[in-house]
Image (tube, rainbow, N blue to C red):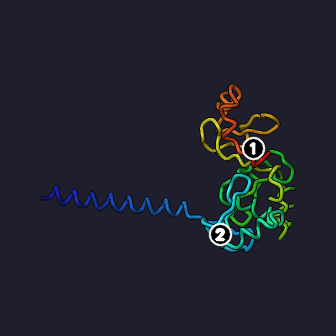
Amino acid sequence: MKTRFMAVVLGCIALAATTALVADEAKEKEFKAICPVSGGPAKEVNYVDYHGKKVYFCCKNCPNAFKADTKKYTAKANYQLAETGQIVQVACPLSGKPLNPDVSSDIGGVKVGFCCNGCKGKADKAGDDVLALLFGDLAKGYTLQTACPVSGKPIKADKFVEHEGKKVYFCCGGCPAAFTADPAKFVSKLPQFSEAEK
């Protein structure tokens, strides 16, 4: 009788632990993004393709405004790519120089790193123009590549090689050798070489 009771108790504890774990995972995966057109909360069901990624909107009308004048919303769309983890910062967005791990600012919930306090100061003083300053042009500080083409793991900004004039990022120091031995095997996995970016 005691054995059955203990089995039931242990079963309940395991069920409670599993339920808590699932709830924690759901919180981690909770979608959060700002519509680049309205500034309101975006929904995952309302999106358009943009540089091989997705830009999300609050309603079905905002994508039409975005498509009609994409240039007007570029900085906000790029900011959303950072907000949703679809791009990775690899350098200072102002100078293009390597990031200083001790120098960063929180821009609406997105951590933006800089090479120096001078660049950070410019961003901190930009006010309403901060998104245009930091996200108007992704080329200096960000990459659309988020995964290592060899391992599939998240990339590191300081692990890269140049291929056909573009940087290819990796997760570690060992993967570049596999890439350079046979680039054709991996290039299809890289957004910087996709048709959308040519």
> In which quadrant of the rendered image does the C terminus lie?
top right
Nearer the N terminus, badge 1 or badge 2? 2
Q: Position of residue 28 (x, y in %)?
A: 54, 60
> Is residue 195 shown left or right of residue 15?
right
What residue appears at the point 71 percent right and 28 percent down from the top-left corner? Answer: 180
Residue 59 vertical position relative to residue 130 in the rendered view, above or below: below
Three-letter amino acid code of the residue under disc 2 = Ala
Image-quadrant location for residue 32: bottom right
Q: Secondary structure at mark 2?
A: loop
Q: Position of residue 158 (x, y in %)?
A: 73, 40
Front-most of residues 163 and 160: 163
What residue appears at the point 79 percent right and 48 percent down from the top-left corner? Answer: 91
Label number found at residue 42 = 2
Residue 191 vertical position relative to residue 187 in the rendered view, above or below: below
Q: Secondary structure at mark 1?
A: helix
Task: Report, in whole angstroms, how far the alpha carbon at label 1 lies from the one at label 2.
Answer: 26 Å
Image-quadrant location for residue 41: bottom right
Three-letter amino acid code of the residue under disc 1 = Gln
